[in-house]
Image (cartoon, rainbow, N blue to C red):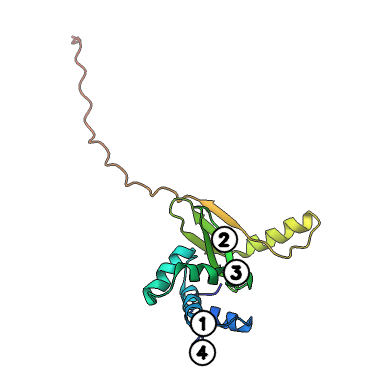
Amino acid sequence: MDTPASSDREGISRIERLCIERGLKMTGQRRLIARVLSESADHPDVEELYRRAHERDAHISIATVYRTVRLLEEKGILERHDFGGGRARYEPTEHGPHHHLIDVDTGKVIEFADDRHEVLAREIAARLGFELVDHRLELFGRRFPEPRPEAAPAARRAPRPRHGRDEA
């Protein structure tokens, strides 16, 4: 799995490089959006991407961010995900094979890869008569509650003597 990198040896971001390779004209604002995306360790939605870009350039508009994201998606540079919550989130397509576990309470996305899953996916496809050419897995879950510290045991009392008839 790739890790976010702000730039390569030539001083351009990974997404800028992909844009150039695919023939996109790189304006200053597109470069900024590409850099912000390349530096993102999460899966930002357009609003978050705009917020991050706007911190660096107050002249960038949300419309520019929307247009650029749509263009990068059309060119196969960004992949769109629907992790719930009513907003599309994005990540670079050149991110390596991985899957997502989405925390339904916080919206946090955890990426993972597991060779056992890959083998199982191929086996299932083969059993059903298919050669697996691609797949994606998105798991939605809720964290287990944190274990509570054990309550201090109630003070143990000595058993009370039974009061009854005295035997003589």
Q: Which residue has dot 2 on it?
A: 81
Kindly state the secondary structure of the residue where label 1 is placed: loop
Q: Amino acid at mark 4?
A: Arg
Q: Residues within 10 Å of mark 2 (few under 14, many from 20)?
A: some
Q: Which residue has dot 3 on it?
A: 73
Q: Quadrant of the C terminus?
A: top left
Q: Amino acid at mark 2?
A: His
Q: Residues within 10 Å of mark 1 (few under 14, many from 20)?
A: few
- Could you tell me how far apart the alpha carbons at marks 1 and 3 are, in whole angstroms? 17 Å
| Mark carried by residue 27 | 1
Q: Amino acid at mark 3?
A: Glu
First-in-chain label (1 vs 4): 4
- Could you tell me how far apart the alpha carbons at marks 1 and 4 are, in whole angstroms? 21 Å
Pick the residue in front: 157 or 109: 109
- Could you tell me how far apart the alpha carbons at marks 2 and 3 are, in whole angstroms? 11 Å
Q: Quadrant of residue 17?
A: bottom right
Q: Residue furthest right?
A: 129
First-in-chain label (1 vs 3): 1
**Which dot, 1 or 3, sits closer to the camera?**
1
Residue 42, position in %: x, y?
A: 47, 66
Q: Quadrant of residue 81?
A: bottom right
Q: Quadrant of the N terminus?
A: bottom right
Kindly state the secondary structure of the residue where label 4 is placed: loop
Residue 62, position in %: x, y?
A: 46, 67
Q: Which residue has dot 4 on it?
A: 9
